[in-house]
Structure formats: structure tokens, C-alpha cells
Amino acid sequence: MKSKILVFAFLLVSSSCSIFKTSQTINEKNTDETSTNVEVVSDNIYKKFLGDYAIEIMGIPSGDDGSLTIKVSAENDILKAELIGDSVEASNIFKFQTVEVEDDILFIEIFVPEYSVTGFFELYVEGNEVTGFAFDMFEIIGTKSD
């Protein structure tokens, strides 16, 4: 229940800000809007991004940090992300759209149906350490396991 409240507070604050200008511009470049995962994986060049991520979203206005566990995998040469463990209940609040790697950064596109808002998790992976940003506004820290 605490996770749901944290995710809801995070999404509420995110949807009320004008941070989505950049995200919408990036989204407009996507030509295949019906696909949920569009990044092609060839020769395992994205192998360092595959695995389970335990991340904390820092600075959520509720005062607490949001914890999520995400699994990034490749299926039929396409990257995909899904919530696992206790984080599965957050899938009622937001959906992962696309997963892609650009300039050695993992981008996970997130859609919040309730607010019709799209944003990104921008993850930097160095070994098992993960850092990044959620919706260009909140810091992400965490770990990755294979």
C-alpha cells in the first residue's frame, strides 16, 4: 500500500509539471505507436543492460523514496521491461512502453493512462551500480543483478 501511495504521489507531481515537453518531442519521433517494445538487439551489444534492477526514486514530494524492481530482458531480439516482485502492483498505475539504448544510456518509456502522460526512466549502468533520472526530475539510484 505504501508503494502505491508513493508511486501515485510521484505521478501526481510529475503530471502537474511542464517537464514533459522534451518527452513528448522524443515520443513524436516514434513512428510505431502500437508496439510496446521496439529496440532491436543484435550481437548482444546490450547485454550489460539485461538483468534485474532494484531502484530507488529519490526526492518524491511525499517525502519518501519510491522503490521499484524492474526486469529488463530481450525477447526475440527486442528489449523489454517489466515490474517484478512487490513492484507488480504499481503496474496498475503506469505501463512501460518502449525500452531502448542510446549513447550507452537505457531509456524506459513510461505511460500513465490516468493522466495521459508519457515520460522516461533514464538509467546509467556501470557494473552493478545504477544511477539516473525519472521524468528528468527525480534522481534514481540502485543496483543491477544479472
Image (cartoon, rainbow, N blue to C red):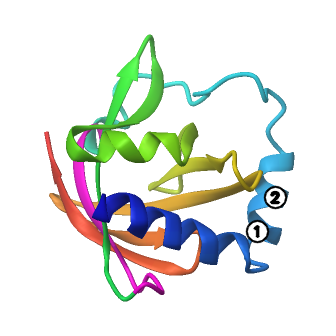
Please give the label number shown on residue 58: none
| Apparent side of residue 85 relative to residue 82 in the rendered image (left or right) | left
Helix, strand or loop under label 2? helix
The residue tagged 2 is: 24
Give how far across and how far down residue 55 sits, in percent. 27, 62
Q: Give the spatial CA distance, label 1 vs label 2.
A: 6 Å
Other residues around mark 1 within 10 Å, as few (<14) / some (14–19) / many (≥20): some
Other residues around mark 2 within 10 Å, as few (<14) / some (14–19) / many (≥20): few
Picture layout, residue 117 above or below residue 80: below
Give how far across and how far down residue 105 sits, in percent. 46, 57
Marks 1 and 2 close (CB-CB < 8 Å): yes
Which of the two residues, 117 or 128, is positioned nearer the viewer here?
A: 117
Q: Residue at x 32, y 82 (%)?
A: 64
- Occupied quadrant, residue 91: top left
Residue 47 in the magenta stretch? The answer is no
Q: Residue at x 45, y 63 (%)?
A: 7
Q: Residue at x 76, y 68 (%)?
A: 20
- Occupied quadrant, residue 80: top left
